Amino acid sequence: GNAISVTNTAVDSPIIDHVNMLQPYIGILFSGANFAYAQNLNIQNATFEGVEINNSGNIMLTNVSAANTAVNTYTSSASLFISGSASGGIAIIGGEWYGASGYALYYNTNAVGNSISKAYFDSSSKGSQINTASVLSLIGDWFSGGRVSPFYPGLLVAAGDSITIQGSQFFGNGLDGLLLIGGTHIVIDGNVANSNGTNSTKHGIEVSANVTDFNITNNIATGNPGYGIFINGGTSTRYTITGNNTSTNTAGGIGGSFPGSFYGPGLSGSGTAANF
């Protein structure tokens, strides 16, 4: 069963501190909770999820680490699972989050004002996924995973609005380091995407068609078998790609099919690139 369940905490604001858990179904479940704090926890071999935050607000986790074996192989099981329309005001600071058959991070809420910083995410099978988000900040995190067939990117952003990914590292992932397949108003700034595509010819950072209003600035995307940055055709012209180091990639620095009117050195693929 669940090691700890936290519900309806608007008044007492519990603090969970220095707890070790071995092989729970879910290490900590926050469900309908409000104002709760957990720190210095170690959750080992959770068979479903390390920590689940569901329809809970104003939750802070500091230096919480979890390993998810996902024995039950649920579709979206994860070491850290965040969902529900009421899950706003969440801060995840530090910690190590490991997945085996599940995700390291699975994020699925449009509640605003959440942040994840200085956390380490690694899942050998599925990597991490943002299914949808609104006003989410990922600052100084590490994403690795997707190294087992059928292979996944380190972090996949499926949809969302106003997402900032800054100062993070994407290393040794099975497919792309960072893959955007949906979303708008996305900032990708000052990250490192190195040595990805370990089981493919994928890229450091890839943007799929029809992602809109994004900025890719000041990143280091090197040593990937594909391109450092790859933009697929059909992407909105409302984007900026500038100040990036995209050297030592096998296919080239920046590639793809670009709408827009910019002409400059080091471009390949069809079309031209806007606002590099």
Image (cartoon, rainbow, N blue to C red):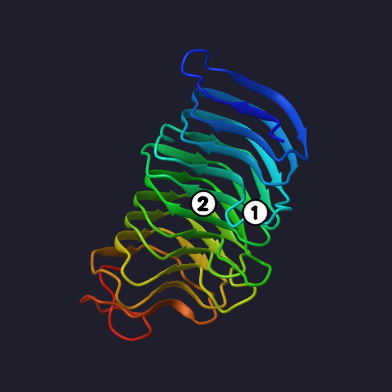
Number of numbered labels in the structure image: 2
> Disc 1 vs disc 2: which is toward the camera?
1
Q: Farthest residue in the top direction?
A: 12
Which callout, 1 or 2, points at the residue further toward the start of the chain?
A: 1
Q: Farthest residue in the bottom direction?
A: 270
* Distance (Cα) linking label 1 and label 2: 13 Å
Q: Nearer the viewer, residue 9 or 260?
A: 9
Q: Which amino acid does label 2 sit on?
A: Ser
- At label 1, counting other C-alpha atoms closer than 10 Å, the crowd grade (few under 14, some 14-19, many 20 or more) is many
Please report the residue visible at 56 percent of the width from the left and 60 percent of the height from the top. 154
Residue 109 location, x and y as percent? 42, 44
- 58 shown above or below 221: above
Q: Nearer the viewer, residue 260 or 65?
A: 65
Numbered tag placed on residue 168 in the rendering: 2
Residue 203 location, x and y as percent? 51, 72
Please report the residue visible at 60 percent of the width from the left and 19 percent of the height from the top. 15
Seen in the image, is 273 located left or right of residue 232?
A: left
Residue designated by label 1: 122
- At label 2, counting other C-alpha atoms closer than 10 Å, the crowd grade (few under 14, some 14-19, many 20 or more) is many
- 262 shown above or below 134: below
Q: What residue type is labelled 1?
A: Asp
